[in-house]
Amino acid sequence: MVTLASIAGIPIGLDEDSTQVVYDVENMVCGSTKHISLRDISPALLNKALRYPESVYAHHCNMVMKQDADKWPEKFNYEIIYLPAGLLGIEYIKTHIFYTAWQSAKAAAVIQVILGVLTVILQKNKSNLDPYDIELSVEDACIMEIAQGEKVTIPSGYYYTFVNTHEAPVVFARLVASEQALDYQTLQRVNGLAYYLIAKNARQELVTNPRYRSLVEVKQISVDELNTTVGYRANSKVPLYQEVCNNRKVFEVLLVA
């Protein structure tokens, strides 16, 4: 058992035998656990013919300490996501694509990595004023790595997905104010995002999606740069869960409702 309580701020751990996130059921509640299948995320895959693995990752929703249940903001969803190591064909294993419509100076989500190193790909599409033009073009694209313990905001208006490019599993927390899994009808025609992270000759490589009409160069962006875009000052000494408990009004202003 790998204990994660010191970084997460809540009594959770990783059972290495079952490769499952476990929590103290006497002191915590979990609203639901979703085991995301390959079929669930197939619209975003480079290779849609894949049949393995059947279960890709686990998503634990609405987790809260029982002692905080009465004061926890009702609209906030604190989630724990377990993303194993491995490949989906030649792609590194990844999550759903998520999206929240743009609101000025607002974040779609706040992320804290609890175990491992997490890669995030972010993409903002150009606005299309022609209702008859169905082609998609990219306005901005970023990629970043988040180290264990770090917290970062995801700006609203961006499509984003989480990727594990390392040989060890990743456990991370995500704070949102509403469900944000993408309706894939918007991107199914173009096979998901404009960029895929693949393994090639034992190295990772970012390749482009030819179904997009116009692409931009993907920028490497740091945690601090991304947090600055929405004015979030992460407290490196306090876990995300505790930070929300201590400063709920900050996050009510920060997150898109």
Image (cartoon, helix red, strand yellow):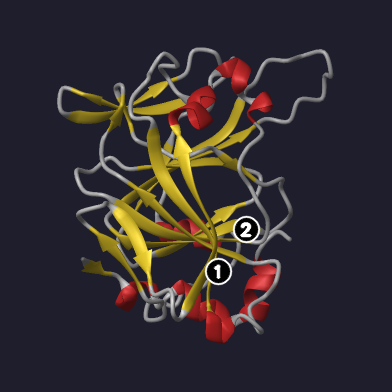
Q: Which residue is drawn at the image coordinates 53% and 41% (left, top)?
A: 160
Q: What kind of residue is marked 2?
A: Ala
Q: Secondary structure at mark 1?
A: loop
86 up-or-down from 255: above or below: above
In the picture, the quarter occupied by the N terminus is bottom left
Q: Which residue is nearer to you in this view: 51 or 183?
A: 51
- Number of numbered discs: 2
Residue at 19% of width from left, 43% of height from top? Answer: 167
At label 1, the amino acid type is Tyr
Residue 76 seen in render: yes
Name the spot of residue 22 as percent of width and height, x first: 35, 64
Q: On the picture, is 139 further left or further right than 164?
A: right
Q: Given this view, does label 2 or label 1 mark the residue nearer the observer?
A: 2
**Residue 71: x %, y % from top left:** 65, 84
Please indicate, yes or no, whether residue 216 appears anywhere in the rendered image: no
Image height of 224 relative to 164, above or below: below
Where does the image place residue 203, in percent across and percent down from the top left? 19, 30
Q: Earlier in the sequence, mark 2 or mark 1?
A: 2
Furthest residue to the left? Answer: 202
CB-based contact (under 8 Å), mark 2 and mark 1 = yes
Q: Quadrant of the C terminus?
A: bottom right
Q: Which residue bears the numbered disc 2?
A: 107
Q: Which residue is mark 1?
A: 232
Q: CA distance from mark 2 to mark 1?
A: 9 Å
Question: At x 73% / y 56%, what residue is drawn?
Answer: 104
